[in-house]
Image (cartoon, coloured by chain):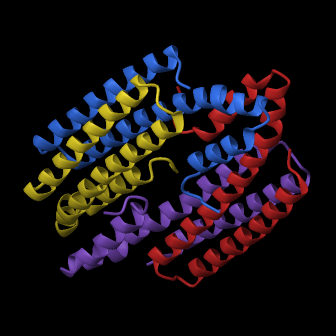
Chain colours: A yellow, B blue, C purple, D red
């Protein structure tokens, strides 16, 4: 469950990513050097991954934790692992 | 060197990513379920990675190829490998 | 805390990865086609990532869960997030 | 096409990865702390990725370059991009 602190942090980061994506579009529009464009794309990917990180941390601190405390943690744990290791399925 | 075809494709994809990022912000605003937010972030990361892919393909087809044909390919090859394998440096 | 089931599964997978790595060495020795070698390396990376996945799942089901139940979960949660999102540090 | 230099480098690295994988198995056998095991798995993944890196560099310097010089580069370029961006298919 998102709280105010994570919401504020995530929205700020997402605003920045939006700006990065528009910046990349301007670089493409201006036919800038491909490797420079790709490096900016990688930076935006990393910034997005930070959003996933802070939201996941909050998720474990709230939803997963509460489910565990109620003795119903397994489903949340499975979901957490599936999300984090999405590229290596059983 | 970006050409018209790749420019058009990349700009279209970047527009979509911008929309995805705004959509994620709305999910955060609306305190949607964390895992759903994270899955949307992953989708936006993948869409960005596709932009890197099409720009890199064009780069190899133009800048790298021309440098090789002029007998000056090594620097471009080193740059290509550094960009693609950025998380595993020597 | 590793249990018998995860131990058996992980050891089996690690044995297979060892075999994959030796197989890649034979391909290199035999100067096989580079892309075929790289695809085998990627397969071995994925197999290793599966080991990380099953060990992490067990970790959350045991160490993290127990710490949460004892009211001492925060440190374990921070460690979990740091490990999983190692490429996107704050 | 693998040359002697890359062969020697790759075989040395693969030998080390084999040792790392056996080391991880000993950690699992000894029921070491899960996060320590996972960190060693990540290190082995990175070491494998370095093998992919040096083989790919050699591939671009030889097979891709020669195909470009013969005017037959497109197929090799497509293969290169498919291999490197395997997680983001069109």
The quadrant of the picture occupied by the C terminus of chain B is: bottom right
Say which residue appears at 65% left-offset and 38% top-offset: D83
Q: Is residue A13 above or below residue B89?
A: above
The quadrant in which the N terminus of chain B is found is top right
Give residue D33's position: percent from left, percent from top: 46, 81
Q: Which sits in the foreground, B47 or D67? A: D67
Q: In the rendered image, is residue A1 in sight?
A: no
Q: Is residue B47 left or right of residue C74?
A: right
Q: Is residue B36 above or below residue C77?
A: above
x, y percentage for residue A70?
16, 66
Counting from the top left corner in percent of width and height, residue B83 is at 56, 46
- Does any portion of residue A68 appear in the rendered image? yes
Q: Is residue C51 left or right of residue B43?
A: right
Say left or right for B86 vs C78: right
Residue located 41% across and 67% down the image: C83
Judge whether B55 appears above or below D10 on screen: above
The outermost residue toward the left is A4
Left or right, B71 with reference to A57: right
The answer to whether B7 is drawn above or below residue B49 in the figure is above
Q: How many marks?
A: 0
Residue at 67% across, 48% down: B78
Percent position of residue B53, x then y: 53, 33
* Residue at the image position 20 percent from the left and 62 percent from the top: A67
């Amino acid at each position: 469950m998102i709280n105010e602190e994570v919401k504020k942090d995530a929205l700020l980061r997402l605003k920045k990513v939006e700006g990065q994506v528009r910046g990349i579009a301007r670089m493409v529009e201006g036919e800038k050097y491909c490797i420079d464009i790709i490096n900016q794309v990688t930076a935006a990917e990393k910034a997005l991954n930070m959003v996933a990180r802070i939201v996941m941390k909050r998720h474990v601190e709230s939803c997963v934790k509460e489910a565990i405390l109620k003795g119903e943690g397994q489903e949340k744990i499975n979901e957490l692992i599936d999300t984090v290791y999405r590229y290596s399925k059983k």
